[in-house]
Amino acid sequence: MLVFPNAKLNLGLYITERRPDGFHNLETVFLPLPWTDALEILPAETGHLTSIALTGRPIPGDPVTNLCVRAYELLQADFPQLPPVQMYLHKIVPIGAGLGGGSADAAFALKAANELFGLNIPSETLEGYARRLGADCAFFIQNKPVLAVERGDVFQEIDLSLTGTGCVVVYPNLHISTPEAFAGITPQPPAHGLREALAQPLETWRDTVSNDFERSLAPKYPVLAAIKQELYAAGATYASLSGSGSAVYGLWAAGAPAAMPWPTEYTVWQGVL
Ligand SMILES: C[C@@](CO)(OP(=O)(O)O)[C@H](O)COP(=O)(O)OP(=O)(O)OC[C@H]1O[C@@H](n2ccc(N)nc2=O)[C@H](O)[C@@H]1O
Ligand SMILES: Nc1ncnc2c1ncn2[C@@H]1O[C@H](COP(=O)(O)OP(=O)(O)O)[C@@H](O)[C@H]1O
């Protein structure tokens, strides 16, 4: 079975409180972004163990710890009838970018295994497995815009459509790990209610929707503010860091902008939502 795990963007991100479990309560909107990896899952040949073959962008760490493999092993622990599988992952979405690529791969591995082997696991239960793999992993099970609260894995419905909006996502070839980004944060309540701010026209978001990680990462990585400034200079209606970075995106209310001359070491996705 072949699936295409997509990235996500964060629309606003407020870190409101440190939790006793070491995580943070946050408030953000996750938006699916049609920039994808490709993941194939097949039953392994008789006698073989579960394994993964990787192509495309290099993924740090031993392949046996790849989130796709860990996702499948979580299911196998509860469904011993599941056979070993061979996975092929072609990695396209940048890593350490705040685009949730690894979490998406894991969530799509859960969904693909559920379908391939006819397990009939309901979405809420799949979300439970996904939560054990990463805070933003559960979002990719239903993969629709949601307001995420608590650790970022509890979802509230939100009525939001950006269909027809132009989008440019710029990854400046800089890996920022999520724990590193949290280390610089002082939690505080948001200045504006996110749900209310996002209900207003895109033109207003620049003054009302922000990402708390920008403030803490800006002094260490000036490139982030520089990209945001270039997106606004090119006419973006709204621009922001995604998640804990380092990808920065711009949205154009009037559709796609002209191609921009970014440095060749950057990775850029451009399209219409
Ligand atoms: C904070 C967000 C916002 O979108 O950042 P990005 O990963 O997208 O950049 C995500 O929810 C992240 O989700 P995910 O990347 O799955 O996080 P995890 O692997 O579960 O956690 C990595 C580490 O980040 C910190 N962490 C994560 C989520 C959270 N609500 N509070 C935290 O303090 C913890 O130190 C944790 O050990
Ligand atoms: N399939 C995978 N794709 C990407 N990263 C993976 C994968 N499996 C494990 N990882 C690990 O997860 C970490 C971050 O993944 P990712 O979700 O892409 O980060 P972010 O959400 O910050 O962009 C990486 O350090 C990587 O080693």
Image (tube, rainbow, N blue to C red):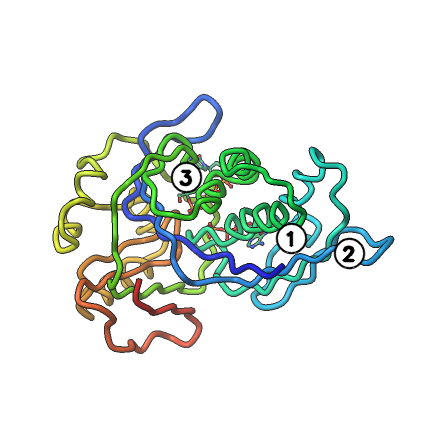
Residue 236 appears at what percent x and percent y?
20, 64
- In the displayed orientation, state which residue is furthest to the right: 47
Neighbour class for label 2 at 10 Å: few (<14), some, many (≥20)?
Answer: some
Q: Quadrant of the C terminus?
A: bottom left
Neighbour class for label 1 at 10 Å: few (<14), some, many (≥20)?
Answer: few
Residue depicted at x 87% and y 53%? 47
- In the displayed orientation, state which residue is furthest to the top: 20
Q: Quadrant of the N terminus?
A: bottom right
Q: CA distance from mark 3 to mark 1?
A: 21 Å
From the viewer's perspective, is 257 left or right of 139? left
Determine the secondary structure under disc 3. Answer: helix
Residue 108 appears at what percent x and percent y?
55, 51
In the image, residue 109 sits, relative to residue 146, either above or below, namely below
The residue indicated by pointer 1 is 61
Between label 2 and label 1, give the one nearer the viewer. 2
Mark positioned earlier in the residue sequence (2 or 1): 2
Q: CA distance from mark 3 to mark 2?
A: 39 Å
The residue indicated by pointer 2 is 44
Which label belongs to residue 182?
3
Residue 212 appears at what percent x and percent y?
29, 42
Residue depicted at x 25% and y 48%? 160
Q: Which quadrant of the view contains residue 248?
A: bottom left
Q: At label 1, which amino acid type do we have?
A: Gly
Mark positioned earlier in the residue sequence (3 or 1): 1
Mark positioned earlier in the residue sequence (3 or 2): 2
Q: At label 3, which amino acid type do we have?
A: Phe
Q: CA distance from mark 2 to mark 1?
A: 23 Å
Q: Nearer the viewer, residue 45 or 57?
A: 45
